[in-house]
Image (cartoon, rainbow, N blue to C red):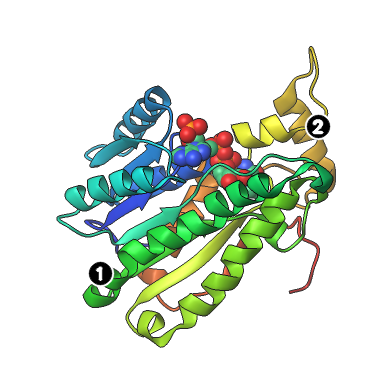
């Protein structure tokens, strides 16, 4: 299937590894120019090299900075617009997730940080690009959220809360006639358990001598209907599909990518 987005221009946030990198890689393979961001410049440069290697001819730009800050967003948007002749056609919102913990330990600052990173940052980025998307009658926004939006994970309360706020806002905005009637779609992509450093770091059973990847896979084999963890690459391919011409009639959706882990009918 030709996704029909070759020559488009994407900003993929938090993309030096994991789900962001998987998404940038899949978009670049479709001929999309990508600007990728992360705080650590070295890992980011290595990610850009990987994209250039696996998607020969791809236009890749890197912006080192914290996407949850105003400066980080301004730098990312400036670089992406420069690469795309002034416009961003595709926005993939992503950032690090809030830390796990117990709600009795989270003070107001912890909540503000979570809401800032996982709700307000994507909203501010959407606000910055959406009117141009509407005017040009093409726009794709994918927010990387979490399966915790549908099935909350107790120790990830900051994530459950902040991401649910984003999900509620997107449900309304995606259906706003000024958006939906102009070929601008906004969807959320919900990872279940995808093998990334974030998943490895969250793994409770780690200790000296424990092979974390093997333990995670063993656990996945028993609890995930698909019998395995997901890969960042296959996650990225679904992200690229949501960004495609082919997905133009799909908006305001929460798409689970979890190997069947979420047990509900709806
Ligand atoms: P990851 O492998 O740890 O990668 C995170 C990426 O985001 C890195 O490139 C990191 O680079 C960058 N990043 C983090 N904070 C940033 C910031 N403030 N500004 C710019 N870049 C930033 O994590 P992941 O598994 O891909 O997770 C991505 C998102 O999906 C997270 O919000 C996570 O909570 C969520 N999620 C993941 C899973 C899963 O199974 N993997 C499941 C549910 C939800 P730097 O550190 O250098 O900035």
Quarter of the image for the N terminus: give it.
bottom left
Is residue 38 left or right of 30 when viewed as pictured? right
User: Which of the two labelled residues, at mark 1 and mark 2, occupies the earlier sequence position?
Assistant: 1
Which one is nearer the viewer's eye here, 233 or 252? 252
- The percent position of residue 175, horizontal first and vertical second, equals 48, 82
Is residue 202 left or right of 139 when viewed as pictured? right
Residue at image position (31%, 48%) is: 74
Residue at image position (47%, 57%) is: 122
Q: Is residue 190 above or below residue 16?
A: below
Which one is nearer the viewer's eye here, 56 or 122? 122
Which of label 1 and label 2 is nearer to you? 1
Q: Residues within 10 Å of mark 1 (few under 14, many from 20)?
A: some
- The percent position of residue 91, horizontal first and vertical second, equals 38, 57
Q: Which mark is residue 204?
A: 2
Q: Is residue 246 above or below residue 53?
A: below
Secondary structure, mark 2, is loop
Decide if residue 230 is in sight here: no
Residue at image position (64%, 54%) is: 146
Pointer 1: what residue?
Answer: 132
Q: Quadrant of ligand 1?
A: top right
State the residue lying farthest toward the top.
209
- The percent position of residue 154, horizontal first and vertical second, equals 82, 50
Q: Is residue 76 above or below residue 44?
A: below
Residue at image position (73%, 25%) is: 212
Q: Which mark is residue 37?
A: none
């Amino acid at each position: 299937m030709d996704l029909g987005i070759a020559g488009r221009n994407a900003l993929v946030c938090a993309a030096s590894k994991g789900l962001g990198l998987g998404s940038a890689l899949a978009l670049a393979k479709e001929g999309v120019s990508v600007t990728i961001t992360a705080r650590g410049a070295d890992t980011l440069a290595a990610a850009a090299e990987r994209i250039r290697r696996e998607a020969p001819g791809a236009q890749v730009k890197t912006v080192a900075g914290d996407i949850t800050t105003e400066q980080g967003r301004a730098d990312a948007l400036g670089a992406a617009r420069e690469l795309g002749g002034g416009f961003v056609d595709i926005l993939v919102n992503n950032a690090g997730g809030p830390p796990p913990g117990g709600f009795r330990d989270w003070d107001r600052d912890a909540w503000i940080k979570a809401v800032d990173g996982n709700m307000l940052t994507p909203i501010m980025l959407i606000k910055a690009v959406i009117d141009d998307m509407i005017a040009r009658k093409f726009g794709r926004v994918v927010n990387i959220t979490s399966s915790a939006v549908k099935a909350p994970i107790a120790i990830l309360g900051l994530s459950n809360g902040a991401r649910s706020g984003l999900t509620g806002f997107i449900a309304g905005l995606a259906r706003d006639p000024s958006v939906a009637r102009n070929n601008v779609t906004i969807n959320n992509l919900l990872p279940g358990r995808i093998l990334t450093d974030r998943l490895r770091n969250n793994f409770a059973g780690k200790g000296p001598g424990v092979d974390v990847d093997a333990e995670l896979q063993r656990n996945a084999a028993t609890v995930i209907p698909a019998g395995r963890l997901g890969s960042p690459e296959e996650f990225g391919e679904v992200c690229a599909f949501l960004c495609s011409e082919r997905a133009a009639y799909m908006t305001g959706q929460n798409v689970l990518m979890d190997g069947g882990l979420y047990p509900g009918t709806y």
